[in-house]
Image: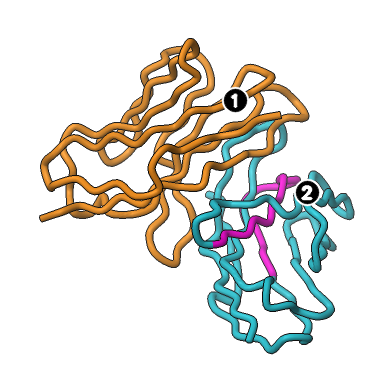
């Protein structure tokens, strides 16, 4: 079984400041980890994913995340926030083996950018 | 390329009325298909998933049902809607034995 905890349902940062969205996971099997972004009244778009290999993963729009097994974390960062980053962000986990492909999502973090 | 279509985009239905939301995928075959519901502050809850025609797994007991009459068609239904069925419903697909999911644009359902 898998679960995801996103710390902070709302995060506000100033334009140009560092963005840090936190995600911790629990998984009984080796995990695959994902970050998705959702703009108002739209579906979810994949930002980045970790499956195997390099633990620092780069995604679209300048975002990156680092898989830290010892901390069971997969935090999302961006060095400099842009107004267009305002959206809701979801961390998700699945199992890395057949029969565990279903995604389990966190409750989301709404990111607000202050001009 | 693959695309996913979900409709309608918005829907307002009275309590006790039936529901049918449709989702179709193009450009791939034998996809895994999913229905999620998103309620404010509660993230995405997986309602149903399907690995093939006629194969439906329900994740949570509820007032809804799902069907997969064709390989790339996934339908979410209810015979009688409840107020608690209001929410944002998302259809998604993934390749078999692959966890990366691709989402439709969602349907905002309001039960009044």
User: In terms of image quadrants, where is residue B22?
Assistant: bottom right
Question: Between B46 and A23, which is closer to the camera in this rendering?
Answer: A23
Question: Between A59 and B96, which is closer to the camera in this rendering?
Answer: A59
> Could you tell me residue B87's position as x and y percent?
59, 69
Label 2: element kind: loop
Q: What residue is rendered at 60% in x and 67% in y?
A: B6
Q: What residue is rendered at 24% in x and 37% in y?
A: A19
> Could you tell me residue B62's position as x and y percent?
80, 62
Question: Between A13 and B33, which is closer to the camera in this rendering?
Answer: A13
In this view, the residue farthest toward the front is: A8
Q: Name the residue under label 1.
A: A26
Label 1: element kind: strand
Colour applied to chain B: cyan
Crowding at mark 1 (Cα within 10 Å: few <14, some 14-19, many 20+): some
Q: Does the magenta stretch include residue B32?
A: yes
Residue B59 - label: 2
As displayed, is residue B58 above or below residue A62?
A: below
Overall secondary structure of the magenta section:
strand
> Could you tell me residue A20's position as x and y percent?
28, 34
As displayed, is residue A9 above or below residue B67?
A: above
Over which residues does the magenta segment extend? B22-39
């Amino acid at each position: 079984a898998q679960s995801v905890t996103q710390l902070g349902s709302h995060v506000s940062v100033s334009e140009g400041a560092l963005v840090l969205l936190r995600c911790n996971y629990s998984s009984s099997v080796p995990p695959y980890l994902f970050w998705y972004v959702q703009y108002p009244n739209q579906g979810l778009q994949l930002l980045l994913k970790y499956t195997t290999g390099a633990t620092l993963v780069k995604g679209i729009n300048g975002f990156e995340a680092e898989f830290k097994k010892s901390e069971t974390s997969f935090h999302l960062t961006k060095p400099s926030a842009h107004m267009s980053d305002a959206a809701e962000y979801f961390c998700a986990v699945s199992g890395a083996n057949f029969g565990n492909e279903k995604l389990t999502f966190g409750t989301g973090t709404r990111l607000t950018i202050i001009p | 390329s693959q695309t996913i279509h979900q409709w309608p985009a918005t829907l307002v239905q009275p309590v006790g009325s039936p529901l049918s939301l449709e989702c179709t995928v193009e450009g791939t075959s034998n996809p895994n298909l999913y229905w999620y519901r998103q309620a404010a502050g509660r993230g995405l809850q997986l309602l149903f998933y399907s690995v093939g025609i006629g194969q439906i797994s329900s994740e949570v007991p509820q007032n809804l049902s799902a069907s997969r009459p064709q390989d790339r068609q996934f339908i979410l239904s209810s015979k009688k809607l409840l107020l608690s069925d209001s929410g944002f419903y998302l259809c998604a697909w993934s390749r078999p034995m692959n966890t990366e999911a691709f989402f439709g644009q969602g349907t905002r359902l309001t039960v009044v």
